[in-house]
């Protein structure tokens, strides 16, 4: 049992086919009380599904199509939830050294004319003097690949030089039907009565995109045009804040990090890179990326906090780790998934990943509101550490998030009783 969890708890476990032998197989199960005073532990195994062909077993239709409590969310005042969650954006717009006015700059505006760090960061990232001298710069190419692809696919290189290709192979072979179903659409699936989680906020704030406000260099503007004309024209009329691509990357990336906690810092660093790539292409500002991260964090936390939806996540985790472990053995990369992780030769170290992720939490913005507020963790956020610290209580996991969080006062910090996703440093907490 698990302390503080009401029964019955259900988990689906996947046993690799090569762990079975012809004839009779014995399944051994060990269970424990959650603490020394508990006395009601019990066990049942009502369902045993065997696929002798080794064909991956997807979720049942009823599981994916069911309505979950976490599908619906409403702001305390009854308004659109994510517009409300991101209301600190209104304060950011009043800080001239953070954001420029929501207007198109006149042709011929120079870099020296920019005041807000939001605009300066975009221009320096998009066309800095020592970078991006041609379209085939690797960073530009990665940004274009990310922008055109699905995050859970393009971010596979964040898993390392061994596990990344194995994961990509498993996706291509349709060996991860449960994992892919969650990452592809079910984590972010909007209700029938709503749009994508971020879109209502975009419509509410209607902040113009960087390339719209600052123009392209070919027209005496400030932005290098790395994407196609169609790519820019298609988004010119859509609001910039928050970044939809970044929302997708964090919803999928944080989910991947919870399914594979052994690689959480590296996955989160790559997730932040996906968001940063939207700045390279000048589709978004740092504040847009931070807003997308907040939406993705909240969305994923609510999924893990939903007991019924949580079962889907655990089933996907069992599937993903079993498939990757099997592939590790087949390629002699390790006898277990954990060995496979340790044996990887390339990729970010934990310290490198933590630094990258940490820097992109604030993008160098100064603290602009109260800097001495006590740590404040949103109610559901502790569930984001459920797979990293399964033996801790939710209160203890929340304490870990509080201990590793940023100080208060940075742009998009949410004051009040709700808690602030802007302050969370998930990479450090893991």
Image (tube, rainbow, N blue to C red):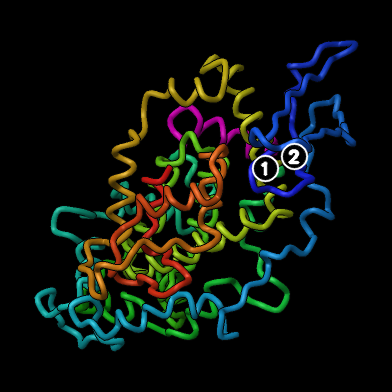
Q: Residues within 10 Å of mark 1 (few under 14, many from 20)?
A: many
Q: Are marks 2 and 1 in contact (CB under 8 Å)?
A: yes
Is 182 placed left or right of 292 in the picture?
Answer: right
Q: Residue at x 48, y 34 (%)?
A: 262
Q: Name which residue lies at 68% across and 48% down.
A: 5
Front position in the image: 114 or 215? 114
| Disc on res. 11 | 2
Drawn side of residue 207 relative to residue 173, left or right: left
Spatial CA span between label 2 and label 1: 7 Å
Residue 331 shows which numbered tag? none
Residue 67, image x, y percentages: 77, 64
Decide which of tag 2 and tag 1 comes sooner along the chain. Answer: 2
The range drawn in magenta is 159-176
Q: Position of residue 368 (x, y in %)?
A: 23, 74
Q: Residue at 20% across / 85% down in the picture?
A: 107
The secondary structure type at the circle numbered 1 is helix
Side of 51 where 393 appears, left or right: left
Image height check: is 200 above or below 321?
Answer: below
Say if 281 sits above or below 315 in the image. Answer: below
The C terminus lies in quadrant: top left
Please tell me whether residue 233 belongs to the stretch shown in magenta: no
Q: Is residue 73 visible?
A: yes
Magenta residue check for 174: yes
Instruction: Determine whether, in the image, residue 390 is placed left or right of residue 426.
Output: right
Q: Could you tell me which residue is drawn at 39 percent across and 72 percent down?
A: 414
Residue 204 x, y percent position in the rendering: 48, 86
Quarter of the image that includes the N terminus: top right
Q: Give the structural element (helix, strand or loop) at label 2.
A: loop
Residue at the disc numbered 1: 314
Q: Residues within 10 Å of mark 2 (few under 14, many from 20)?
A: few
């Amino acid at each position: 049992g698990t302390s503080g969890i009401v029964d019955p708890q259900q988990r689906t476990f996947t046993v690799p086919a090569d762990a079975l032998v012809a004839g009779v197989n014995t399944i051994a199960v060990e269970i424990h009380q959650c603490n020394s005073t508990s006395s009601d532990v019990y066990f049942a195994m009502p369902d045993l599904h065997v696929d002798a062909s080794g064909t991956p077993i997807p979720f049942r239709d009823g599981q994916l199509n069911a309505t979950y409590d976490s599908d619906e969310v409403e702001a305390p005042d009854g308004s659109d939830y994510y517009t409300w969650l991101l209301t600190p954006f209104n304060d950011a717009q009043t800080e001239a050294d953070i954001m420029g006015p929501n207007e198109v700059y006149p042709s011929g505006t120079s870099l020296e004319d920019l005041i807000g760090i939001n605009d300066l960061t975009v221009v320096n990232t998009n066309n800095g003097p020592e970078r991006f001298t041609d379209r085939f710069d690797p960073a530009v190419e990665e940004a274009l690949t990310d922008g055109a692809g699905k995050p859970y696919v393009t971010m596979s290189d964040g898993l390392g030089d061994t596990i990344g290709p194995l994961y990509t192979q498993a996706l291509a072979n349709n060996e991860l039907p449960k994992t892919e179903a969650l990452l592809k659409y079910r984590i972010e699936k909007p209700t029938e009565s709503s749009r994508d989680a971020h879109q209502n906020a975009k419509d509410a704030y209607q902040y113009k995109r960087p390339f719209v406000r600052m123009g392209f260099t070919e027209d005496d503007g400030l932005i290098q045009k790395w994407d196609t004309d169609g790519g820019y024209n298609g988004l010119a009329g859509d609001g910039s804040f928050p970044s939809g691509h970044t929302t997708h990357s964090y919803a999928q990336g944080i989910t991947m990090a919870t399914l594979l906690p052994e690689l959480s810092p590296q996955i989160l660093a790559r997730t932040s890179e996906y968001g940063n790539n939207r700045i390279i292409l000048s589709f978004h500002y740092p504040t847009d990326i931070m807003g997308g991260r907040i939406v993705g964090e909240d969305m994923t936390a609510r999924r893990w906090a939903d007991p019924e939806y949580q079962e889907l996540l655990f089933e996907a985790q069992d599937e993903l780790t079993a498939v990757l472990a099997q592939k590790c053995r087949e390629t002699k990369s390790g006898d277990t998934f954990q060995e496979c992780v340790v044996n990887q030769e390339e990729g970010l170290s934990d310290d490198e990943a933590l630094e990258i992720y940490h820097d992109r939490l604030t993008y160098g913005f100064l603290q602009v509101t109260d800097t001495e507020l006590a740590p404040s963790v949103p109610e559901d956020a502790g569930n984001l550490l459920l797979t990293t610290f399964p033996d801790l209580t939710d209160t203890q996991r929340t304490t870990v998030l509080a201990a590793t969080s940023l100080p208060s006062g940075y742009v998009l910090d949410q004051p009040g009783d709700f808690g602030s996703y802007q302050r969370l440093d998930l990479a450090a907490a893991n």
